[in-house]
Image (cartoon, helix red, strand yellow):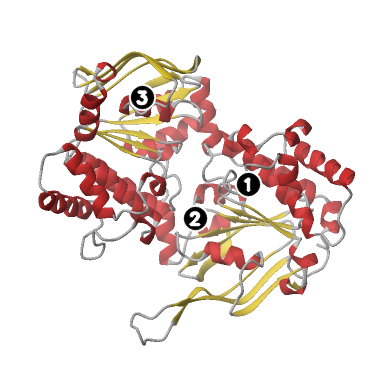
Amino acid sequence: MPLLTLNAVAVSIHDTAILKNLNTTLDAGQVMGVIGESGSGKSMMALAIMGLLPQGSALTGQILFDDVALNELTEKARCQICGDDIGMVFQEPMTALNPVHTIGQQVIECIRLHQPISRAAATALASETLSRCGLPSDQFPLSRYPHELSGGQRQRVVIAMAVALKPKLLIADEPTTALDVTTQAEILDLLCSLQQEDDMALMLISHDLAVVASMADTVVVMKEGVIVEQGDIEPVFTQLEHPYTRALFKASDHTPPRTAPNHRALVNHSAQSESPLLEVKDLVVAYRVPGRGWFSRANTFRAVDQMSFSVNAGESVGLVGESGCGKSTLTRAVLGLMPVASGRILINGTHIDEGRHVLKQVQVVFQDPYGSFNPRHKVARLIAEPLNVLETQPTRRERDRQVVSILEDVGLLSSDADKYIHEFSGGQRQRIAIARALITRPALIVLDEAVSALDVSVRATVLDLLASLATAYGLAYLFISHDLSVVRNVTDRVLVMQSGQLVEQGDTQSVLDHPTHDYTQRLVASVPRLPEYAHAAIDTL
């Protein structure tokens, strides 16, 4: 008998159908992968199982867990089961954790809510569980707060909260989306070991097909609230019977068409000169670190240490490395947003300190498009913000004309200028972020994890857009990403950064196919890959 069964499950919110006639099963000790685009209903299915649907939701059908109809239980009885026998790991650990409580308090709370044990016993169990999840108490005491941990460490705390009572089923909703490749590999290994040690069923929700292929026994493919295909992982990934499944696979290894920038665009960016567009020479960026004692001296920490590299006009350069290696600090320095201790940053041969006319040639697209916009302003104002750095301000009519032109260039409608940012999907928001970066006609755009939060099909369309804009505008890109498969497909050269230093650089294909530095080799080895049978299926598409 299956551990979990969904019989004709449907969910609507205020009479709008969200999930439609879901039928699937998950056996004890089995790993199920759930894939699909954003908005396909993956997370809503998990929330329906957990009883966490938003207000205004109506659920029909039956959700059976251990032959008990969860959706027919009282809230108290359901909460007991969902705490003891079903655990859930959410996508964003910082929002899943309470910032004013220590990690020990939060794990202990999960234990004592569902088990009548003393605080001392709960503390011992919390410490043991955190150690199982890679956070031993001698290095990570229970008194630590979430903000004192890295993203991967916070995710381990969330996993510890979910598995402390050894549930029969663990639901992991995009548990590695925002993590770098080595941290992602560590979290996936942790989930695998916990699943095998406790003989636990695992429902892994992800838009990364390689992650699902490497871990799952069965797979469910969802689109627009419907399960369009399901079954054992190898037959589904080999036969690719449904058109939507085939489209997901094609998008997962998408390489955007790239052509050389047109001559006119390059002339506009003074690219005919022999000097690089961006040149970083012996750059050092340091932070002051307080001493450990009352009378000890403050120390300095070099977040960027003697880095030198260049980006030529019309070139796409990738910057890769683990979280904390200094990528974001380097980005802020290039954008003129933080002081440097030593070294130089030149744009078209001019130091960035020489005025706004230099900095306007560089713009940025951030990882989270929603968080980088003011939600109270309309799109027209958001896109036009960078025009404020120009020495000569355009007229209101010219400003409106430029906004409309840029919106159309990124594939949106002129009428979108009068909307608010919450009215758009994630992919559309990123297009608006790209439009904002283009409005000053820069020569270089820094893309800071600009596609890491997008599902594979939306990511493919955004990458195509960036490639076409590079041709039309003569743009150069500094592409910062932890997704080496994307870097491989969209960049000419790659820079590998570790602990503030540049440890390897060169032609992208050469570096990623034949890495020479130990750190690069470790990064490449950590990248999840589709199995050979899936690659063979993709080749036939």
Residue matched to label 2: 513
Position of 200 compared to 338: left or right?
left
User: What residue sits 33% from the left and 58% below the top?
Assistant: 145
Q: Earlier in the sequence, mark 2 or mark 1?
A: 1
Q: Position of residue 267 (x, y in %)?
A: 86, 58
Asked if residue 254 is positioned above or below residue 291 in the image, the reply reads: above
Per the image, the residue denoted by label 1 is: 373
Name above or below for residue 447 compared with residue 529.
below
Q: Is residue 254 left or right of residue 8?
A: right
Dot 3 and dot 2 residues touching (CB under 8 Å) = no
The N terminus lies in which quarter of the figure? top left
Q: CA distance from mark 3 to mark 2?
A: 43 Å
What is the distance, in whole Å, between disc 3 and disc 1 at their CAs? 31 Å
Q: Residue at left 21%, top 48%?
A: 108
Characterize the local packing of mark 1: few (<14), some (14-19) or many (20 or more) Cα atoms within 10 angstroms: some
Where does the image place residue 212, in percent across and percent down from the top left?
Answer: 38, 36
Question: Residue 65's x, y, as percent?
Answer: 23, 22
Point out which mark residue 48 bears: 3
Q: Which mark is residue 511?
A: none
Give, as a three-letter code, the residue at label 1: Phe
Amino acid type of disc 2? Asp
Q: State which quadrant residue 429 falls in.
A: top right
Q: Nearer the viewer, residue 112 or 311?
A: 112
In screen coordinates, is 1 left or right of 421?
Answer: left
> Label 2 neighbourhood size at 10 Å, few (<14), some (14-19), many (20+)?
few
Helix, strand or loop under label 2: helix
User: Looking at numbered disc 3 in the image, what kind of residue is underneath it?
Assistant: Ala
**Quarter that holds the C terminus:** top right
